[in-house]
Image (spheres, rainbow, N blue to C red):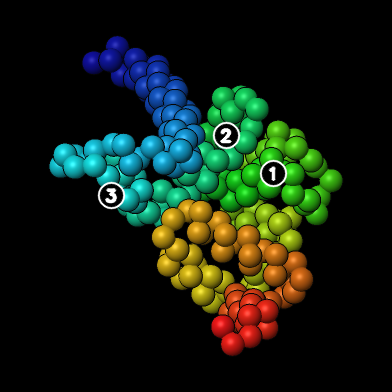
Amino acid sequence: MTADLDLRPAMAQRLHDEALSLGATVARDVFRLALIAWQIHEDRLWQYLRLPIGRLCGTEEEYFEAYFDVDSWRTAAKRIRIGRMLAALPEPEKYLDDLAHVGTAKAEMIAPLVIEAAEDRPLTGAMTGPAAVATAWIARARNMPATALREAVRLELGRAPRATGDATEDRPLVTARGWMPDLESQALLEDAMRAYRKMEPTGRFVGLLTAALMEFLSSHPGG
């Protein structure tokens, strides 16, 4: 009995190390899966695949909810955004270990920065290129709370910082994004809002949308 008790610390350490190793592998695989999700989305490959009931997928949402173990299309869209970030990097496998330590929630926050760098859009910071941006922001993400990271990303993208305690900020934008039928439409909406925010940094979604509609109507009188 005493011998068994003496073996327990070593057993505990062995199982702990094994759990950490398996956890790291699973975390890396989550990001590999996100990259696959982006490729399936980008090339619309889901339309060639069948659901468990046998018929072809009618929508992208059906495919991801059936096979990617997500509870909603919104979650699937976040994973696809992470995959888009990885696809923008020259050697995505090199980033998997660091991203596994950061986690999917923070990775999704910094994804727009890497994507914009890959698309050669000007950012407010000095870093350029998706690899440099990814390396720097993954390092920041490891050392920042999620709320602070979210605000830092918003500022880097040129968006107005969220007011402390203002739970209604951007809620209409979240609602409008949910109306969009696919990720391309969501990206178009977000790009339009980002462009208007650069012209009017303190504006909220409803005001910016109103301004956009007024500009459209002024260009199409009587339409």
- Eyeballing the image, is 195 above or below 163? above
Q: Front-most of 170 and 144? A: 170
Dividing the picture into quadrants, the one containing residue 129 is: top right
First along the sequence among labels 2 and 1: 2
Q: How far is the residue under mark 2 from the one under mark 3?
A: 26 Å
Q: Residue 207 appears at what percent x and percent y?
A: 63, 81
Q: CA distance from mark 2 to mark 1?
A: 12 Å
- Quarter of the image holding residue 160? bottom right
Image point (56%, 64%), residue name: 189
Question: Which numbered circle lies on residue 58?
Answer: 3
Q: Residue furthest bottom?
A: 222
| Image position of 68 with respect to 185: above or below | above
Amino acid residing under circle 3: Gly
Q: Secondary structure at mark 3?
A: loop
- The percent position of residue 123, horizontal first and vertical second, equals 77, 52
Of pointers 1 and 3, the one earlier in the residue sequence: 3
* Contact? badges 1 and 3 (CB < 8 Å): no
Residue at the disc numbered 2: 87
Q: Could you tell which of marks 2 and 3 lies nearer the N-terminus?
A: 3
Identify the amino acid type marked 2. Ala
Pointer 1 local density, CA inside 10 Å: few below 14, some 14–19, many at least 20: few
Q: Nearer the viewer, residue 32 or 147?
A: 32
The residue closer to the viewer here, 164 or 152, is: 152
Q: Nearer the viewer, mark 1 or mark 3?
A: 3
Residue that label 1 marks: 119
Looking at the image, can residue 211 be seen?
no
Residue drawn at the location 35% of the way across and 40% of the way down: 46
**Rendering quarter of residue 142:** top right
